[in-house]
Protein backbone atom coordinates (compact mmCIF):
# COMPACT_ATOMS: atom_id res chain seq x y z
CA UNK A 1 0.00 0.00 0.00
CA UNK A 2 2.80 2.42 0.93
CA UNK A 3 4.62 1.49 -2.25
CA UNK A 4 1.47 2.28 -4.18
CA UNK A 5 1.30 5.73 -2.62
CA UNK A 6 4.93 6.38 -3.37
CA UNK A 7 4.26 5.48 -6.97
CA UNK A 8 1.22 7.71 -7.17
CA UNK A 9 3.07 10.66 -5.64
CA UNK A 10 5.86 10.17 -8.16
CA UNK A 11 3.37 10.11 -11.00
CA UNK A 12 1.64 13.20 -9.70
CA UNK A 13 4.93 15.07 -9.61
CA UNK A 14 5.45 13.95 -13.16
CA UNK A 15 2.08 15.43 -14.06
CA UNK A 16 3.16 18.83 -12.85
CA UNK A 17 6.24 18.74 -15.03
CA UNK A 18 4.91 17.01 -18.13
CA UNK A 19 1.82 19.14 -18.37
CA UNK A 20 3.69 22.34 -17.58
CA UNK A 21 1.65 24.63 -19.71
CA UNK A 22 3.69 27.42 -21.16
CA UNK A 23 1.77 30.41 -19.86
CA UNK A 24 4.20 33.12 -20.93
CA UNK A 25 3.97 33.69 -24.64
CA UNK A 26 0.53 32.54 -25.75
CA UNK A 27 -2.72 34.29 -26.33
CA UNK A 28 -6.13 32.78 -26.82
CA UNK A 29 -8.27 33.84 -29.74
CA UNK A 30 -11.93 32.85 -29.89
CA UNK A 31 -12.96 32.67 -33.51
CA UNK A 32 -15.40 31.09 -35.89
CA UNK A 33 -15.59 27.64 -37.39
CA UNK A 34 -15.60 29.26 -40.84
CA UNK A 35 -12.12 30.70 -40.31
CA UNK A 36 -10.80 27.48 -38.83
CA UNK A 37 -12.35 24.97 -41.24
CA UNK A 38 -11.04 26.92 -44.20
CA UNK A 39 -7.49 26.37 -42.95
CA UNK A 40 -6.69 30.10 -42.67
CA UNK A 41 -5.32 29.90 -39.13
CA UNK A 42 -2.97 27.04 -39.95
CA UNK A 43 -1.50 29.29 -42.62
CA UNK A 44 -1.57 32.63 -40.83
CA UNK A 45 -0.56 31.86 -37.26
CA UNK A 46 2.86 30.25 -37.91
CA UNK A 47 3.78 33.42 -39.85
CA UNK A 48 2.74 35.61 -36.95
CA UNK A 49 4.59 33.40 -34.47
CA UNK A 50 7.72 33.71 -36.59
CA UNK A 51 7.47 37.50 -36.56
CA UNK A 52 6.48 38.06 -32.94
CA UNK A 53 7.29 34.91 -30.97
CA UNK A 54 3.71 34.86 -29.71
CA UNK A 55 1.69 31.67 -30.10
CA UNK A 56 -2.01 32.10 -30.78
CA UNK A 57 -4.34 29.32 -29.62
CA UNK A 58 -7.68 29.23 -31.40
CA UNK A 59 -10.99 28.10 -29.99
CA UNK A 60 -13.34 27.81 -32.95
CA UNK A 61 -17.04 28.27 -32.25
CA UNK A 62 -19.84 30.32 -33.81
CA UNK A 63 -19.58 34.11 -33.87
CA UNK A 64 -22.20 34.46 -31.12
CA UNK A 65 -20.38 32.03 -28.85
CA UNK A 66 -17.01 33.65 -29.60
CA UNK A 67 -18.33 37.05 -28.56
CA UNK A 68 -19.74 35.46 -25.41
CA UNK A 69 -16.37 33.82 -24.59
CA UNK A 70 -14.71 37.21 -25.00
CA UNK A 71 -17.32 38.91 -22.81
CA UNK A 72 -16.68 36.38 -20.05
CA UNK A 73 -12.95 37.09 -20.29
CA UNK A 74 -12.04 33.57 -21.35
CA UNK A 75 -10.16 34.75 -24.43
CA UNK A 76 -7.73 37.58 -25.09
CA UNK A 77 -9.16 38.60 -28.44
CA UNK A 78 -11.75 37.48 -30.96
CA UNK A 79 -11.93 37.30 -34.75
CA UNK A 80 -15.54 37.01 -35.94
CA UNK A 81 -17.93 38.04 -38.69
CA UNK A 82 -21.08 39.85 -37.62
CA UNK A 83 -20.19 43.52 -37.71
CA UNK A 84 -23.34 44.82 -36.03
CA UNK A 85 -23.01 42.42 -33.10
CA UNK A 86 -19.32 43.33 -32.84
CA UNK A 87 -19.97 47.07 -32.74
CA UNK A 88 -22.67 46.54 -30.14
CA UNK A 89 -20.28 44.57 -27.92
CA UNK A 90 -17.65 47.30 -28.32
CA UNK A 91 -20.22 49.92 -27.36
CA UNK A 92 -21.09 47.91 -24.26
CA UNK A 93 -17.44 48.15 -23.27
CA UNK A 94 -16.49 44.49 -23.56
CA UNK A 95 -14.02 44.93 -26.40
CA UNK A 96 -11.58 47.56 -27.65
CA UNK A 97 -9.55 48.24 -30.79
CA UNK A 98 -11.93 46.70 -33.30
CA UNK A 99 -10.57 46.60 -36.85
CA UNK A 100 -11.85 45.29 -40.15
CA UNK A 101 -9.57 42.49 -41.30
CA UNK A 102 -10.86 40.86 -44.45
CA UNK A 103 -13.99 39.79 -46.22
CA UNK A 104 -15.44 37.10 -48.37
CA UNK A 105 -19.06 36.49 -49.21
CA UNK A 106 -21.90 34.15 -48.50
CA UNK A 107 -23.36 31.91 -51.15
CA UNK A 108 -26.47 29.76 -51.28
CA UNK A 109 -25.66 26.15 -52.03
CA UNK A 110 -27.91 23.20 -52.72
CA UNK A 111 -28.55 20.13 -54.79
CA UNK A 112 -27.16 20.74 -58.32
CA UNK A 113 -30.54 20.28 -60.03
CA UNK A 114 -31.91 23.24 -58.01
CA UNK A 115 -35.52 22.16 -57.26
CA UNK A 116 -36.63 25.66 -56.16
CA UNK A 117 -35.00 27.28 -59.21
CA UNK A 118 -33.15 29.91 -57.21
CA UNK A 119 -30.58 30.23 -59.99
CA UNK A 120 -33.08 32.51 -61.70
CA UNK A 121 -33.51 34.72 -58.65
CA UNK A 122 -32.17 38.26 -58.89
CA UNK A 123 -31.59 38.88 -55.20
CA UNK A 124 -30.84 36.72 -52.19
CA UNK A 125 -34.20 37.62 -50.66
CA UNK A 126 -35.94 36.45 -53.83
CA UNK A 127 -33.97 33.18 -53.69
CA UNK A 128 -35.04 32.65 -50.10
CA UNK A 129 -38.66 33.46 -51.00
CA UNK A 130 -38.54 30.82 -53.75
CA UNK A 131 -37.24 28.22 -51.32
CA UNK A 132 -40.00 29.07 -48.86
CA UNK A 133 -42.67 28.97 -51.56
CA UNK A 134 -41.55 25.61 -52.89
CA UNK A 135 -40.99 24.39 -49.30
CA UNK A 136 -37.75 22.70 -50.25
CA UNK A 137 -35.67 21.68 -47.22
CA UNK A 138 -33.39 24.39 -45.87
CA UNK A 139 -30.75 23.81 -43.18
CA UNK A 140 -30.06 26.73 -40.88
CA UNK A 141 -26.97 26.96 -38.68
CA UNK A 142 -29.30 27.76 -35.79
CA UNK A 143 -26.35 28.63 -33.52
CA UNK A 144 -26.15 32.45 -33.45
CA UNK A 145 -23.08 32.33 -35.67
CA UNK A 146 -22.19 34.96 -38.25
CA UNK A 147 -23.76 32.92 -41.02
CA UNK A 148 -26.88 32.39 -38.94
CA UNK A 149 -27.14 36.12 -38.21
CA UNK A 150 -26.85 36.86 -41.92
CA UNK A 151 -29.39 34.20 -42.82
CA UNK A 152 -31.95 35.53 -40.34
CA UNK A 153 -31.38 39.01 -41.72
CA UNK A 154 -32.18 37.81 -45.26
CA UNK A 155 -35.33 36.01 -44.10
CA UNK A 156 -36.41 39.20 -42.37
CA UNK A 157 -35.73 41.24 -45.52
CA UNK A 158 -37.79 38.71 -47.48
CA UNK A 159 -40.64 39.08 -44.98
CA UNK A 160 -40.70 35.39 -44.17
CA UNK A 161 -40.72 33.65 -40.79
CA UNK A 162 -39.14 30.29 -41.55
CA UNK A 163 -38.98 28.92 -38.00
CA UNK A 164 -41.62 26.31 -37.23
CA UNK A 165 -42.04 25.11 -40.81
CA UNK A 166 -41.08 21.49 -41.33
CA UNK A 167 -38.91 22.27 -44.35
CA UNK A 168 -36.77 24.57 -42.18
CA UNK A 169 -34.29 22.72 -39.98
CA UNK A 170 -31.87 24.18 -37.45
CA UNK A 171 -28.67 22.16 -37.25
CA UNK A 172 -27.05 23.91 -34.30
CA UNK A 173 -23.67 22.89 -35.72
CA UNK A 174 -20.61 24.46 -37.31
CA UNK A 175 -20.52 25.56 -40.96
CA UNK A 176 -18.87 22.44 -42.37
CA UNK A 177 -21.19 20.12 -40.51
CA UNK A 178 -24.23 22.11 -41.58
CA UNK A 179 -23.17 21.71 -45.22
CA UNK A 180 -22.74 18.00 -44.63
CA UNK A 181 -26.26 17.77 -43.21
CA UNK A 182 -27.64 19.78 -46.14
CA UNK A 183 -25.82 17.41 -48.46
CA UNK A 184 -27.38 14.36 -46.83
CA UNK A 185 -30.85 15.89 -46.75
CA UNK A 186 -30.62 17.38 -50.27
CA UNK A 187 -31.39 20.76 -48.80
CA UNK A 188 -30.35 24.35 -49.41
CA UNK A 189 -28.13 26.24 -47.00
CA UNK A 190 -26.36 29.57 -46.69
CA UNK A 191 -22.60 29.27 -46.29
CA UNK A 192 -19.55 31.48 -46.35
CA UNK A 193 -17.53 30.93 -49.51
CA UNK A 194 -14.37 29.99 -47.61
CA UNK A 195 -15.84 26.97 -45.88
CA UNK A 196 -17.65 25.98 -49.06
CA UNK A 197 -14.45 25.96 -51.11
CA UNK A 198 -12.59 24.09 -48.37
CA UNK A 199 -15.02 21.19 -48.09
CA UNK A 200 -16.97 21.12 -51.38
CA UNK A 201 -14.94 18.20 -52.77
CA UNK A 202 -16.63 15.95 -50.25
CA UNK A 203 -20.12 17.16 -51.10
CA UNK A 204 -22.54 16.64 -53.95
CA UNK A 205 -23.69 20.26 -54.03
CA UNK A 206 -23.12 23.42 -56.02
CA UNK A 207 -23.37 27.18 -55.63
CA UNK A 208 -26.83 28.14 -56.85
CA UNK A 209 -26.91 31.80 -55.90
CA UNK A 210 -24.16 34.38 -55.35
CA UNK A 211 -23.17 37.98 -55.92
CA UNK A 212 -25.91 39.96 -54.14
CA UNK A 213 -24.34 42.79 -52.03
CA UNK A 214 -26.46 41.64 -49.08
CA UNK A 215 -24.23 38.54 -48.96
CA UNK A 216 -21.06 40.53 -48.20
CA UNK A 217 -19.24 38.96 -45.22
CA UNK A 218 -16.94 41.23 -43.21
CA UNK A 219 -14.51 39.77 -40.65
CA UNK A 220 -13.39 41.92 -37.77
CA UNK A 221 -10.87 41.51 -34.95
CA UNK A 222 -11.01 43.05 -31.49
CA UNK A 223 -9.29 42.72 -28.13
CA UNK A 224 -11.01 41.95 -24.85
CA UNK A 225 -11.17 45.17 -22.84
CA UNK A 226 -8.45 44.92 -20.15
CA UNK A 227 -10.51 47.24 -17.95
CA UNK A 228 -13.26 44.61 -17.80
CA UNK A 229 -10.94 41.62 -17.42
CA UNK A 230 -7.56 42.42 -15.97
CA UNK A 231 -6.32 38.92 -16.81
CA UNK A 232 -6.74 39.53 -20.52
CA UNK A 233 -3.38 39.76 -22.25
CA UNK A 234 -4.21 43.01 -23.94
CA UNK A 235 -0.67 44.02 -24.96
CA UNK A 236 -0.05 40.77 -26.81
CA UNK A 237 -3.53 40.79 -28.32
CA UNK A 238 -2.76 44.23 -29.66
CA UNK A 239 0.48 42.96 -31.19
CA UNK A 240 -1.58 40.40 -33.11
CA UNK A 241 -4.20 42.93 -34.16
CA UNK A 242 -1.53 45.33 -35.39
CA UNK A 243 0.19 42.51 -37.23
CA UNK A 244 -2.95 41.24 -38.96
CA UNK A 245 -3.87 44.73 -40.21
CA UNK A 246 -0.28 45.51 -41.18
CA UNK A 247 0.92 45.18 -44.74
CA UNK A 248 2.63 41.88 -43.91
CA UNK A 249 -0.48 40.40 -42.28
CA UNK A 250 -2.77 41.57 -45.05
CA UNK A 251 -0.45 40.22 -47.71
CA UNK A 252 -0.38 36.88 -45.93
CA UNK A 253 -4.18 36.75 -45.94
CA UNK A 254 -4.25 37.71 -49.62
CA UNK A 255 -1.84 34.89 -50.48
CA UNK A 256 -3.78 32.23 -48.57
CA UNK A 257 -5.11 29.55 -50.89
CA UNK A 258 -7.02 26.41 -50.04
CA UNK A 259 -5.86 22.98 -51.18
CA UNK A 260 -7.41 23.53 -54.63
CA UNK A 261 -5.68 26.87 -55.12
CA UNK A 262 -8.70 29.09 -54.50
CA UNK A 263 -8.21 32.49 -52.85
CA UNK A 264 -10.56 32.54 -49.90
CA UNK A 265 -10.37 35.94 -48.23
CA UNK A 266 -9.79 39.48 -49.44
CA UNK A 267 -7.94 41.67 -46.93
CA UNK A 268 -9.49 45.11 -46.29
CA UNK A 269 -8.07 46.55 -43.09
CA UNK A 270 -7.66 50.01 -44.62
CA UNK B 1 -12.81 9.43 -53.59
CA UNK B 2 -9.75 7.64 -52.26
CA UNK B 3 -10.19 5.04 -49.58
CA UNK B 4 -9.85 6.73 -46.18
CA UNK B 5 -9.01 3.40 -44.54
CA UNK B 6 -5.87 2.85 -46.61
CA UNK B 7 -4.77 6.44 -46.01
CA UNK B 8 -5.47 6.04 -42.30
CA UNK B 9 -3.35 2.91 -42.04
CA UNK B 10 -0.62 4.71 -43.95
CA UNK B 11 -0.82 7.59 -41.49
CA UNK B 12 -0.49 5.25 -38.51
CA UNK B 13 2.50 3.38 -39.88
CA UNK B 14 4.31 6.47 -41.06
CA UNK B 15 4.16 7.67 -37.41
CA UNK B 16 2.59 10.95 -38.46
CA UNK B 17 3.59 13.57 -35.87
CA UNK B 18 0.21 15.29 -35.71
CA UNK B 19 -1.52 11.94 -35.18
CA UNK B 20 0.81 10.80 -32.42
CA UNK B 21 0.78 14.18 -30.65
CA UNK B 22 -2.99 13.86 -30.41
CA UNK B 23 -2.78 10.28 -29.16
CA UNK B 24 -0.12 11.24 -26.62
CA UNK B 25 -2.24 14.11 -25.29
CA UNK B 26 -5.25 11.80 -24.92
CA UNK B 27 -3.18 9.32 -22.95
CA UNK B 28 -1.72 12.10 -20.82
CA UNK B 29 -5.04 13.76 -19.99
CA UNK B 30 -7.04 10.59 -19.33
CA UNK B 31 -4.07 8.90 -17.64
CA UNK B 32 -3.52 11.68 -15.15
CA UNK B 33 -7.24 12.04 -14.50
CA UNK B 34 -7.27 8.34 -13.68
CA UNK B 35 -4.27 8.64 -11.35
CA UNK B 36 -5.66 11.61 -9.45
CA UNK B 37 -9.11 10.02 -9.19
CA UNK B 38 -7.45 6.86 -7.82
CA UNK B 39 -5.37 8.76 -5.28
CA UNK B 40 -8.57 10.15 -3.81
CA UNK B 41 -11.05 7.45 -4.81
CA UNK B 42 -9.34 4.33 -3.44
CA UNK B 43 -8.74 5.68 0.09
CA UNK B 44 -12.30 6.96 0.21
CA UNK B 45 -13.55 3.55 -0.90
CA UNK B 46 -11.48 1.93 1.87
CA UNK B 47 -12.73 4.46 4.40
CA UNK B 48 -16.40 3.99 3.49
CA UNK B 49 -15.97 0.22 3.55
CA UNK B 50 -14.40 0.05 7.01
CA UNK B 51 -15.77 3.01 8.94
CA UNK B 52 -19.22 4.03 9.98
CA UNK B 53 -20.02 7.70 9.60
CA UNK B 54 -23.16 9.83 9.40
CA UNK B 55 -25.02 9.76 6.07
CA UNK B 56 -22.83 6.93 4.84
CA UNK B 57 -25.53 5.29 2.73
CA UNK B 58 -26.44 8.67 1.25
CA UNK B 59 -22.79 9.20 0.30
CA UNK B 60 -22.60 5.78 -1.37
CA UNK B 61 -25.84 6.48 -3.22
CA UNK B 62 -24.51 9.79 -4.49
CA UNK B 63 -21.33 8.11 -5.72
CA UNK B 64 -23.37 5.46 -7.50
CA UNK B 65 -25.51 8.12 -9.14
CA UNK B 66 -22.52 10.14 -10.32
CA UNK B 67 -21.01 7.06 -11.95
CA UNK B 68 -23.33 7.74 -14.85
CA UNK B 69 -23.13 11.54 -14.81
CA UNK B 70 -23.48 12.87 -18.37
CA UNK B 71 -20.06 14.21 -19.43
CA UNK B 72 -21.56 17.18 -21.28
CA UNK B 73 -23.26 18.38 -18.11
CA UNK B 74 -20.07 17.88 -16.11
CA UNK B 75 -18.21 19.81 -18.81
CA UNK B 76 -20.70 22.65 -18.61
CA UNK B 77 -20.39 22.87 -14.82
CA UNK B 78 -16.60 23.00 -15.03
CA UNK B 79 -16.78 25.51 -17.85
CA UNK B 80 -18.84 27.86 -15.73
CA UNK B 81 -16.61 27.31 -12.69
CA UNK B 82 -13.32 27.74 -14.53
CA UNK B 83 -14.40 30.62 -16.74
CA UNK B 84 -12.74 33.94 -15.86
CA UNK B 85 -16.15 35.11 -14.74
CA UNK B 86 -16.67 31.95 -12.67
CA UNK B 87 -15.80 30.99 -9.10
CA UNK B 88 -12.50 29.33 -10.01
CA UNK B 89 -11.71 31.83 -12.75
CA UNK B 90 -8.61 33.08 -10.91
CA UNK B 91 -6.90 29.79 -11.76
CA UNK B 92 -6.94 30.76 -15.42
CA UNK B 93 -6.93 27.15 -16.61
CA UNK B 94 -9.96 27.09 -18.91
CA UNK B 95 -8.93 25.86 -22.38
CA UNK B 96 -5.79 24.14 -21.06
CA UNK B 97 -5.05 20.44 -20.45
CA UNK B 98 -5.39 21.10 -16.71
CA UNK B 99 -9.08 21.88 -17.10
CA UNK B 100 -9.53 18.68 -19.09
CA UNK B 101 -7.76 16.63 -16.43
CA UNK B 102 -9.90 18.24 -13.74
CA UNK B 103 -13.20 17.51 -15.49
CA UNK B 104 -12.16 13.95 -16.30
CA UNK B 105 -11.02 13.38 -12.72
CA UNK B 106 -14.51 14.33 -11.65
CA UNK B 107 -15.95 11.78 -14.11
CA UNK B 108 -13.59 8.99 -13.01
CA UNK B 109 -13.74 9.57 -9.26
CA UNK B 110 -17.26 8.20 -8.58
CA UNK B 111 -16.59 5.12 -10.70
CA UNK B 112 -13.41 4.32 -8.82
CA UNK B 113 -14.80 5.14 -5.39
CA UNK B 114 -18.00 3.21 -5.95
CA UNK B 115 -16.63 0.10 -7.66
CA UNK B 116 -13.66 -0.16 -5.27
CA UNK B 117 -16.06 0.17 -2.37
CA UNK B 118 -18.14 -2.72 -3.70
CA UNK B 119 -15.01 -4.78 -4.28
CA UNK B 120 -13.77 -4.23 -0.73
CA UNK B 121 -17.18 -4.84 0.84
CA UNK B 122 -17.43 -8.01 -1.22
CA UNK B 123 -14.39 -9.59 0.43
CA UNK B 124 -15.31 -12.55 2.65
CA UNK B 125 -15.92 -11.16 6.18
CA UNK B 126 -14.21 -14.24 7.62
CA UNK B 127 -10.93 -12.82 6.38
CA UNK B 128 -11.29 -9.78 8.59
CA UNK B 129 -12.13 -11.87 11.63
CA UNK B 130 -9.28 -14.29 10.97
CA UNK B 131 -6.85 -11.43 10.53
CA UNK B 132 -7.88 -9.82 13.80
CA UNK B 133 -7.80 -13.18 15.64
CA UNK B 134 -4.27 -13.77 14.39
CA UNK B 135 -3.26 -10.50 16.04
CA UNK B 136 -2.91 -8.24 12.99
CA UNK B 137 -2.98 -4.48 13.51
CA UNK B 138 -5.93 -2.59 11.98
CA UNK B 139 -3.64 -1.31 9.22
CA UNK B 140 -2.41 -4.82 8.34
CA UNK B 141 -6.00 -6.08 8.40
CA UNK B 142 -7.05 -3.35 5.99
CA UNK B 143 -4.05 -4.07 3.75
CA UNK B 144 -4.93 -7.76 3.68
CA UNK B 145 -8.51 -7.05 2.69
CA UNK B 146 -7.47 -4.55 0.02
CA UNK B 147 -5.02 -7.06 -1.33
CA UNK B 148 -7.82 -9.60 -1.50
CA UNK B 149 -9.96 -7.08 -3.39
CA UNK B 150 -7.21 -6.20 -5.87
CA UNK B 151 -8.93 -7.65 -8.89
CA UNK B 152 -12.06 -5.69 -8.15
CA UNK B 153 -9.98 -2.54 -7.73
CA UNK B 154 -8.19 -3.15 -11.01
CA UNK B 155 -11.52 -3.68 -12.73
CA UNK B 156 -12.68 -0.36 -11.36
CA UNK B 157 -9.62 1.42 -12.75
CA UNK B 158 -10.09 -0.17 -16.15
CA UNK B 159 -13.78 0.66 -16.27
CA UNK B 160 -12.96 4.28 -15.44
CA UNK B 161 -10.25 4.51 -18.08
CA UNK B 162 -12.64 3.14 -20.68
CA UNK B 163 -15.02 5.96 -19.92
CA UNK B 164 -12.31 8.61 -19.99
CA UNK B 165 -10.75 7.64 -23.30
CA UNK B 166 -14.10 7.49 -25.07
CA UNK B 167 -15.39 10.71 -23.55
CA UNK B 168 -15.84 13.77 -25.79
CA UNK B 169 -18.47 16.04 -24.19
CA UNK B 170 -16.61 17.35 -21.16
CA UNK B 171 -13.16 17.76 -22.70
CA UNK B 172 -14.58 19.51 -25.74
CA UNK B 173 -16.28 22.13 -23.59
CA UNK B 174 -13.47 22.82 -21.11
CA UNK B 175 -10.59 22.16 -23.53
CA UNK B 176 -11.92 23.96 -26.58
CA UNK B 177 -10.29 21.54 -29.05
CA UNK B 178 -7.30 23.85 -29.63
CA UNK B 179 -4.84 22.44 -32.17
CA UNK B 180 -1.64 21.25 -30.55
CA UNK B 181 -2.79 22.21 -27.06
CA UNK B 182 -6.09 20.60 -26.12
CA UNK B 183 -7.02 18.55 -29.18
CA UNK B 184 -7.39 14.89 -28.20
CA UNK B 185 -8.50 11.82 -30.13
CA UNK B 186 -12.24 12.14 -29.67
CA UNK B 187 -12.45 15.88 -30.33
CA UNK B 188 -10.13 15.58 -33.34
CA UNK B 189 -12.36 12.89 -34.83
CA UNK B 190 -15.39 15.14 -34.43
CA UNK B 191 -13.62 18.08 -36.11
CA UNK B 192 -12.06 16.15 -38.99
CA UNK B 193 -15.41 14.52 -39.73
CA UNK B 194 -16.96 18.00 -39.86
CA UNK B 195 -14.37 19.08 -42.37
CA UNK B 196 -14.82 15.92 -44.41
CA UNK B 197 -11.13 15.03 -43.99
CA UNK B 198 -11.68 11.45 -43.09
CA UNK B 199 -8.10 10.11 -43.15
CA UNK B 200 -7.01 11.51 -39.82
CA UNK B 201 -10.46 10.84 -38.33
CA UNK B 202 -10.38 7.20 -39.40
CA UNK B 203 -6.78 6.74 -38.23
CA UNK B 204 -7.71 8.11 -34.82
CA UNK B 205 -10.88 6.03 -34.81
CA UNK B 206 -8.86 2.87 -35.41
CA UNK B 207 -6.46 3.71 -32.57
CA UNK B 208 -9.32 4.61 -30.25
CA UNK B 209 -11.11 1.35 -30.96
CA UNK B 210 -7.85 -0.56 -30.40
CA UNK B 211 -7.37 1.18 -27.06
CA UNK B 212 -10.92 0.50 -25.94
CA UNK B 213 -10.58 -3.11 -27.11
CA UNK B 214 -7.37 -3.50 -25.12
CA UNK B 215 -9.01 -1.97 -22.08
CA UNK B 216 -11.97 -4.32 -22.24
CA UNK B 217 -9.82 -7.31 -23.06
CA UNK B 218 -7.61 -6.73 -20.00
CA UNK B 219 -10.73 -6.19 -17.91
CA UNK B 220 -11.95 -9.63 -18.98
CA UNK B 221 -8.63 -11.28 -18.21
CA UNK B 222 -8.37 -9.66 -14.81
CA UNK B 223 -11.91 -10.62 -13.88
CA UNK B 224 -11.35 -14.20 -14.99
CA UNK B 225 -8.11 -14.37 -13.08
CA UNK B 226 -9.85 -12.97 -10.02
CA UNK B 227 -12.58 -15.59 -10.20
CA UNK B 228 -10.12 -18.44 -10.58
CA UNK B 229 -8.12 -17.37 -7.56
CA UNK B 230 -11.21 -17.08 -5.42
CA UNK B 231 -12.12 -20.69 -6.21
Image (cartoon, helix red, strand yellow):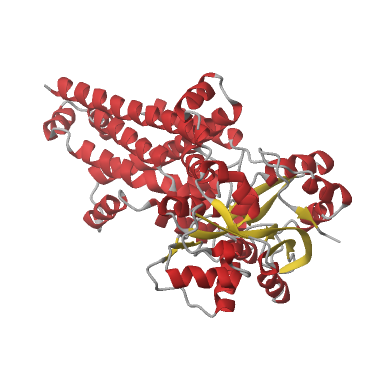
Residue farthest to the bottom? A159
Residue farthest to the right? A247
Is B139 rendered above or below residue A39? above
Q: Dividing the picture into quarters, in which one does residue A270 lie?
A: bottom right
Residue B13 rendering spot, x and y as whole percentages: 52, 19
> Could you tell me if residue A16 is visible in this image?
yes
Residue B114 rendering spot, x and y as whole percentages: 27, 44
Q: Dividing the picture into quarters, in which one does residue A219 lie?
A: bottom right
Is B191 rendered above or below residue B57? above
Image side of residue B80 versus residue A49, left or right: left
Is A256 rendered above or below residue A237? above
Q: Residue at x 61, y 41 (%)?
A: B179
Q: Residue at x 45, y 53 (%)?
A: A181
Image side of residue B2 versus residue A45, left or right: left
Residue B110 rendering spot, x and y as whole percentages: 33, 47
Residue A18 rendering spot, x and y as whole percentages: 59, 33
Is A266 rendered above or below residue B123? below
Q: How many marks?
A: 0
Q: Looking at the picture, tell me which residue is in the foreground, A186 or A142.
A: A186
> Could you tell me if residue B92 is visible in this image?
no
Image side of residue A264 versus residue B110, left or right: right
Image quadrant containing the N terminus of chain A: top left
Q: Looking at the picture, tell me which residue is in the foreground, B189 or A73.
A: B189
Q: Looking at the picture, tell me which residue is in the foreground, B112 or B127.
A: B112
Q: Dividing the picture into quarters, in which one does residue B125 lie?
A: top left
Q: Looking at the picture, tell me which residue is in the foreground, B85 or A258.
A: A258
Amino acid sequence: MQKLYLLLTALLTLLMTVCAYAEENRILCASTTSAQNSGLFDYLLPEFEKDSGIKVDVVAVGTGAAIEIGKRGDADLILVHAKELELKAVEEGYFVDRRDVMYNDFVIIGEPNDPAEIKEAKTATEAFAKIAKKQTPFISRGDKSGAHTKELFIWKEAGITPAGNNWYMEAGQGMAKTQRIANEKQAYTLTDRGTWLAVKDNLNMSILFEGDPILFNQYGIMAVNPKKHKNAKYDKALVFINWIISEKGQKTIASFKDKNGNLLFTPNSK
Amino acid sequence: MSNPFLKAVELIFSFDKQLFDIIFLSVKVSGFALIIASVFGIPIAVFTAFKKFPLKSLFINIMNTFMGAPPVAVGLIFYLLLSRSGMLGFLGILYTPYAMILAQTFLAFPIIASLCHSAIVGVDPLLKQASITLGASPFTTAATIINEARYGIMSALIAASGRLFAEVGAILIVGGNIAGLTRVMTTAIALETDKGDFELAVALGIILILISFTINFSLNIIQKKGKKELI
